[in-house]
Image (tube, rainbow, N blue to C red):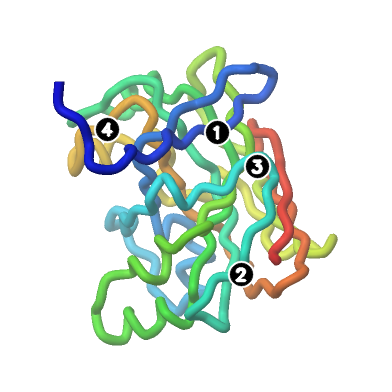
Amino acid sequence: MSTTVFAPPPIITMPITGRTERFAVGRVFCAGRNYADHVVEMGGKVSTEPPVIFTKPASALVCDGADVPYPRATSELHHEVELVLALGKPLADASPEDAVAAIYGLAVGVDLTRRDVQAKAKAHGAPWAAAKAFDHSAPIGPLTVLENPMNAFTGPIALSVNGAVKQSGDLAQMLWSPPQLLAHLSTLFDLHIGDLVFTGTPQGVGPLQRGDYVEAQAQGTTGFSFTVI
């Protein structure tokens, strides 16, 4: 049996509400431009085209309410609250109906963004990796297991900073619903058990500073909080 030169990295896991077991995370996919009001606030035009897809490494997750370090290489860190889907079945070229049945659970997460870095990338038509996929860029709450498939994704999603509500919307405002988004994503990638999908953010994204206390919640999930340090 072959061995590795260095010890393999640890498996990334996240807590599950009401259970001692943890959810082993595979890849982290993210959808951008999936709420019309957010598209407009970012200066874009609402389109029927599929959302922008990008990724974060699983190592970017910050779980269990841990503090989030303010990242280097930016002076404009922004919050984006999102519903997160956790897959319990593989998907490839799936229908929306198959996609719904593959959702193991839901969480609420925050897509942290180096907005100044992203703006420069957009201006040059460059990828968003440095703006989105940095260390500690994906704080996330515990996973809530779905006992039955969800046919409708509605209800509030919100984020507050130091007690003041900054983002407030409804899951029904997504341009591409979770089943549609998963079905589309499965035409681009073979999705696996353990993959997470951030589904986009409503309007109200804005800056975070060291010392800020952030609370995030979404319908069907267990809310969570963290402090930027």
Q: Would you name the residue on which mark 3 appears?
A: 218
Residue appearing at x 57%, y 44% in the figure: 171
Q: Position of residue 102 (x, y in %)?
A: 37, 22
Labels 3 and 4: the sequence-earlier one:
4
**Quadrant of the drawing holding the C terminus:** bottom right
Task: Give how far apart the Cα atoms at labels 3 and 2 are.
Answer: 24 Å
Say few, some or many: other residues with alpha carbon within 10 Å of mark 3 (under 14 / 14 to 19 / 20 or more). Answer: many
* Quarter of the image that includes the N terminus: top left
Q: Nearer the viewer, mark 4 or mark 1?
A: 1
Q: Which amino acid lies under the numbered mark 4 shown in the image of this protein?
A: Leu
Q: Give amino acid for label 1.
A: Met
Q: Return the residue at label 2.
A: 70
Q: Residue at x 40, y 76 (%)?
A: 118
Label 2 amino acid?
A: Tyr
Which residue carries the number 4 mark?
191
> Tags 1 and 2 in contact by the CB under 8 Å rule?
no
Residue 166 pos. (x, y %)? 72, 65
Q: Position of residue 11 (x, y in %)?
A: 42, 33
Q: Which mark is residue 14?
A: 1
Judged left or right of residue 172, residue 209 is right
Question: Can you name the residue that lies furthest to the left here?
Answer: 1
What numbered label is drawn on residue 115?
Answer: none
Dot 3 lies on which element? strand
Looking at this view, is 72 or 173 the one in front?
Answer: 72
Residue 69: name its quadrant.
bottom right
Q: Residue at x 45, y 46 (%)?
A: 198
Q: Quadrant of residue 2?
A: top left
Q: Which residue lies at the image location 24% right of the left edge and 79% below the top edge?
A: 125
